[in-house]
Image (cartoon, rainbow, N blue to C red):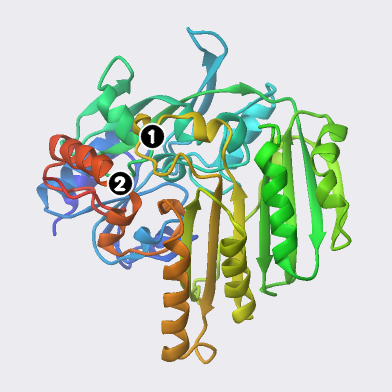
Amino acid sequence: MDITPLRTAVSGSVLAAGEQGWDGARASHAGVGRPEVIVRVSSVDDVSEAVRFAAASRRVAVVRAGGHSAWCTLDDGILIDLTALDAVEVVEDPDGGALVRVGGGARWGDVADTLAEQGLGISSGDTRSVGVGGLTLGGGIGWMVRAWGLAADQLVGAQVVTAEGELVEVSESSHAELLWALRGGGGNFGVVTRFDFRAHDLPAVVSATLGVSGDARPILGVLRDVLATAPRELTVTYMDVPAMDPSAPAGASIVACWIGDDEQALRSALAPLLALDAVTEVDLSVRAYPEILLDAPMPDPEQPLPGFIGGNTLVVDLDDELIDGLAAFREGTPASVLFLRSLGGAFGEVAQDATPFPARGATWFAMAGAFDIPGMVDDARRAELQAAWADLEARGAGVYGNFTTTTDPAFAARMYPPETMARLVALKAQWDPRNLFSRNHNVVPA
């Protein structure tokens, strides 16, 4: 493949295998990719040129922003690295309030920092290095999900480079159906070079960390009951992890985020939990929102991440039977993790057909999985775990694509209800009939 025309057309850098900087450029949070060419764009025009080159050379276009997606680690393709398109600009919303325009290569930590300076926030990811693009296009469950909904629910416009290399502006009044698809339909429809979000007032948050010991079942039952009637300012997670490194000691914890600076309001909401002997208050304090986002260092490329046997499910009714199944899954394998995030509130008030995101009736997001470490999990145990998780997933109403490491092309069929998938397929046929953008939970054009 002759990449000379691409080098001539692009103002950013174009790297081929073996060239200086190649190994660093192909490494990401998800691992080390093996593309044919890496285009580190410096402008929107560069994105258009890279897309046109991929189409003309009959290669797949691989889009990378934050680099947490396992799709970036597969072989071949033209990798379009959006890192340089990271501008964050706050402007006046014509309908009142503020809009934040975010470049397609920006990461949530930088967005949160910029917004915090003006007392603003948007519902975002939990980790600073996660890309705005991937998280938003997949939906985006974050700390403000019960107050403001998904990241995608706050998306009011976008700038998109299509599979033809053309630049289009998308909003409710221009290509509204494409905007619908971008609110949870993944990266199937083009390269989003700018996201326009409606921002919210956010002077501070109250964050609480609670230590948990003993049997998870009664604690999760109380947590469920608390969130059933809690104000939407409150979102919580429950996490139980094995000892992975000194910064993540083994054990279970509950982390709560309250929008605003009212410590007493959060303490009151958590009172039934704090009354339990098995729950201890580790910290409860007012913080700036960026302070509660996690840092995730780049993994060692020489130490690939272990496989993950399990998955996630969007739960309408977190009943005692399901709690027992989730707890038993975690207890059955020492090297496993259990994670729950509360939903409901604003998330549940969005009509099911208003976005592609599934299961708006869900009140909890649940994830469980065992780490597939050589020597610790044999074929028989792997099959047992897969069957156990399948039973748990079947209790839910859908799955969340952003929280899976699978690159199975068939996975998208598990993400969307049939009527939603049909609508996405029709849009895919309109905007990307050759399936140039297939390195994602792929919607195959009709």
Number of other residues with Cα within 10 Å of mark 2, as a class: few under 14, some 14 to 19, many 20 or more: some
**Which labelled disc corresponds to residue 167?**
none
Q: Earlier in the sequence, mark 1 or mark 2?
A: 1
Q: Nearer the viewer, residue 401 or 167?
A: 401
Q: Which residue type does callout 1 highlight?
A: Gln
Question: In the structure shown, which secondary structural element does the residue marked by tag 2 occupy?
Answer: loop
Q: Nearer the viewer, residue 18 or 391?
A: 391
Residue 330 visible in rendering? yes
Q: Nearer the viewer, residue 187 or 87?
A: 187
Q: Is residue 404 left or right of residue 215?
A: left
The residue under the point 50% across, 12% down is 93
The residue under the point 11% across, 45% down is 446
- Name the residue beneath numbered marker 2: 417
Q: Is residue 348 left or right of residue 264?
A: left
**Which labelled disc corresponds to residue 352?**
1
> Based on the displayed image, in which of its 4 quarters is residue 254 positioned?
bottom right
Question: In the structure shown, which secondary structural element does the residue marked by tag 1 occupy?
Answer: helix
> Based on the displayed image, in which of its 4 quarters is residue 424 positioned?
top left
